[in-house]
Amino acid sequence: MKFRTFLATTCIAAMPALAQAADDPNILLIIAEDMGFEASRCYSVGDQQAKIPYIEAMCDTGQVFENAYSAPACSPTRATIMTGKYGFRTVVGAAIPPGSTKGLSAEEASLFDVISGTNYSSNLIGKWHLAGDGEGLDHPERMGVSDYFGIFRGRARDYSDFPAVSGGEQVRVTEYATTALTDRAIDWIDDRDTDQPWFLWLAYNAPHSPFHLPPADLHSAGGLPKGEESITANRLPYYNAALEALDTEIGRLFASMDEETRDNTVSMFIGDNGTPNQVTRGFYGDHDAKGTIFEGGTHVPLVVTGPGVKSGRSEAFVATVDLFTTIAGLTGADAPEVDGHDFAPAFAGEETSRDYIYVEHFSAEEPTRSDVYGWAIREGDFKLVAEEGVEPVLYDLAADPREAVNLLADGVSSEEAAIVDSIKARLTEIREQ
């Protein structure tokens, strides 16, 4: 483990200090797959979290967002980032099946289309999952990503031997997936013209299943057995090992940059949805996993570092749809205003314009596993959850962050009725916008 220790120490020391905001900063968006809020050591919730020293260093030097929300599943989250629109507008409301022809329409104005009108070079490396195979492997190119490399479907069945898409063609990769994506990102950044700013969307598939033991030099859980029987008996340490391996490779990515590049890069790290139910540790009780419209499915970690970003913690509401608007704004692009809000003012500790959170989960397919379809809206500390076919429930997240007590269960007071009416009016406003 000498490499692991050296890398963490080197990269933590290399984290850029607060600098004056640059006019044209590089922008790096890093997405961890299936990493919910409670899985990050940057938040004082839950226990048994993975060792992630580099991400923790980002949290120590950057702005940590306490109230960041995604969709409950990977495809709709990615669609919100790509378009700046809620799922009911793009009709991407759940994970897209492999053979589907009903993914994100290439007619949508994508984040990459918008950025193409600026002086930025851009790329997406990693998990796509915005289309099914039936829509063609050139779907990324039709969405404005000309140099896409990554896992096209929802997951890799084997982290060390999997099909990827490169140049619109399927290729076989026999390198550990987290390492392969990092290698590609390093090469792409190295190839950039030093006078041209860039935006890179780096979408890891870790720590998504299949649960496994990563290469030994990437984590500190070397005593774990490799057999499927051991993994099935207790998946959590393997999930944590994959997260630690992800952290190691993020550290290597930053260590590969020269100091000037690091200091001029706004880096965002976010989870794409809640933690899988096999490894949630029971933190959220009955509402504990990806696929649900409760906190366990949609409350995710988010940290931002770089020029113009103060060290601290922000209570600002942030939705993944806001990444479209914020990233476009950082590049100077003329982005359409739909559902996203620019949360860049929060980088400097200032107030932002978003005063509610809206999440949704829907599909023509029957729900599977822990999936919960419907919508939820949070206004202030109150959150109304409207599951399909079930009476809405109301929670006070300030007093009850794990959503254990339905305020409407023992009758509805006039105050509670007013809160419900206000939130339902918000839903009408969103849907009719």
Image: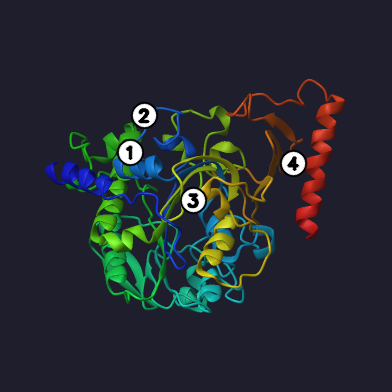
Front-lying residue, 199 or 372 = 199
The residue under label 2 is 48
Amino acid type, callout 3: Asp
Q: Please name the residue shown 59% across and 66% down the image.
A: 83
* Mark 4 to mark 2 CA distance (whole Å): 35 Å
- The answer to whether residue 139 is visible is yes
Which residue position is annotated with label 3? 272
How is this picture coloured?
rainbow
Q: Are marks 3 and 1 in contact (CB under 8 Å)?
A: no
Spatial CA distance of label 1 from label 4 is 36 Å
Up the image or down, 90 lies above or below 242; here it is below
Work out whether mark 1 precedes mark 4 in sequence or the reverse, and give the earlier one: 1
Q: Quadrant of the N terminus?
A: top left
Residue type for callout 1? Asn
Query: Would you name the residue on which mark 4 appears?
Result: 389
Name which residue type carries label 2: Gln
> Label 1 near label 2: C-beta < 8 Å?
yes
